[in-house]
Amino acid sequence: MTKLRQFLNLSYCRYYSAQQAKKKVPIISCKRPEFNHYEGQTYGKFEVINLASKGWLHDKSKGDYFSIYGNASKKDLGPVFKKSFEEIGLSEELREVMTHQGYSLPTVIQAKSFSPIIQGYNTAITAETGCGKTLAYMLPILQHITQWKPHIQEEFNSPLAVVLTPSRELASQLGEVATSLAETQNINVTTLIGGKTKKKILDPPIEYCDVLVATLGAFSKLVTTGIYKIHNVHHVVLDEADTLLDDTFIDKLAAVLKKFRIHYKCEIKTPPEGCQITLVSATLPHELPESVSAFMDPQSLRTVTTNNIHRILPHVPHKFLRLGKAQKPGELLKLVQADMNMNRQVMIFSNKTATCDFVSMFLNENNVECLNINGRMAVPLKAGNMDLFKSGKVRVISSTDVASRGLDTTGVGHIINYDFPLYTSDYIHRCGRTGRLGSPSDCTITNFIAWPREIQLVQRIEEAIRRNKELPNVNANIKRQIVNRIVKMSGSMQ
C-alpha cells in the first residue's frame, strides 16, 4: 500500500505540474501543442524527451514547425550589472566620448571586462553577439594609450596596440569604431586590409599609428617585410578569436604572435613592459587554453563571460520550419514579401555560394530587390553591396557565412537561414546579425530545415533548450583543429 500511495502521489504531482505549466506561455511552441515546453518544466537525467522535431526525418513531417521563445529557464540569469562608466574606472575624457555617442551605461560585458584588461591581464571575452564586445576591449586600450603616449617616443608605423581580425569587412568596421572613439583623444588609428599589400610593400606608408586594426594576412606580410614595427606594441586583440584559432588561420597566427613579448601579466606602468593579449568572440571553446599554448601561457588567461554564452538569443523568437527542398523558394518569397510590406531589413544565409547566388537571382526575378555577398566576389563589389544594405538603400541581402561574424547590422529585423548551418557556432553568429543593441524590437529568425544533417542538428538544439543547457558542439570545428595540433606535437616529440 505504501508503494502504491507513493506512486499515486508522484503521478498527481506530475499531473498538477503539467496543468500548471499549461497556464503559462510556452517557451517552445509547436504546431502540435502536446509538444509545447514551458518555463520551469524539467526532465529526468535519463528521461526520453518527446521532441517536436523527433519525426522530421520522415517525409510526412513536411509542413511541421516549432518556435523557441528564449531559454528554458530564467532562474539562472544571475544579478544584472548596473555600474556606471565612472564606477568601472573609465577616464573622464572617454566618459565624455561615450555620452556624446549616446551611451549612458556600460553593458554587462563592458562592465565585467574593463577591470582585468586595464590591470594588464590576458583576457578572453566571450559574450553573446550584439552586446557591445568591441567597446569592451577598445575603451581600456584607448585609456592605456592616453597614459602611455607622453612617455613613449613616437615613431612612424609603430603602433601601441594591434587588433587582428579574420575578414576585411570586420577590420573596416572596427577601424571606423576605433576612429570615432579616438578622434578627440589625440590617438591615431590606422586600418590595414588585404588586397593592396603589394602596393604598400613597394610604396610603404609613413604615418604615426597608435592603434592598428588589420586583417591577419596583411599584417603578417607588412610586419615580415619590416614596414610595420612591433617593438612598441603592448596590447594585441584577436577579434573573432575562434575563427583565427581554427585550421584556416592558426599556423599563420601562431607565427605572428610568437614575435610579441606576451607576458603572464603586463606590468602597467609608463611606459609598460611586455604585451598583453585579449581574445574576443561569441563562441570560444572550453578547450581554448590548449589552442593558445603555441604563443602564450594558457594559465594567464582570465575569462569574462555572460550568462547567455553559447545559448540562443533569449529576446528573439526562432522558428524552425520542416520543408522539402522544392518548397523552400516559395516559402522564402512569401516571407520576404511580408518583410517588404513591414519595411523590414532581411539577411538570408546559405551554405554555398551557388545557393547564395540562386536566392539573389530568384528574388530579383520576382520583383524583390536583393543584393548578394559571398567570399568569391571582388572586394570593392562586396564592400559596396554591404554598404548599400547597411545604409538601408536595399533591404534584402543574400549571403554566405562571410557576413555572419562581427559585422554591426543593427538595422536587420529578420534572419532567414535558407540553408541551416553545418555547425552550431555558425548558427549563433548568423542569428547575432539581429537582436543587437539598437536593433528593432520585433526581430525574428526563421530556419528552413530540409536535409537529414540539418534535422539532426535541430534535434540536438531543441533538446538543449528543453534541458536548459548550452547549445551542443559549439566548438566542434576548433576542437578538431586542437586535436590535430596535439597529435602533431606528440609526433614531433617522439
Image (cartoon, rainbow, N blue to C red):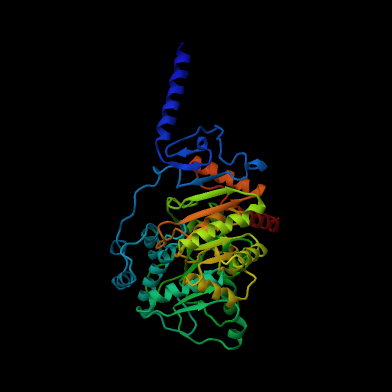
Which corner quadrant of the image does residue 2 belong to?
top left
In front of the other: 76 or 439: 439
Quadrant location, the C terminus = bottom right
In front of the other: 233 or 444: 444
In front of the other: 488 or 98: 98
Where residue 277 sits in the image (x, y, percent)? 48, 65
Answer above or below: position of 48 versus 114: above
Q: Residue furthest top?
A: 1
Q: Is residue 91 left or right of residue 428?
A: left
Residue 477 visible, this orientation: no
Where residue 221 sits in the image (x, y, percent)? 60, 77
Where residue 487 sits in the image (x, y, percent)? 67, 54
Answer above or below: position of 231 versus 166: below
Residue 110 visible, this orientation: yes
Q: Residue furthest bottom?
A: 203
Answer above or below: position of 156 versus 483: below
In front of the other: 209 or 53: 53
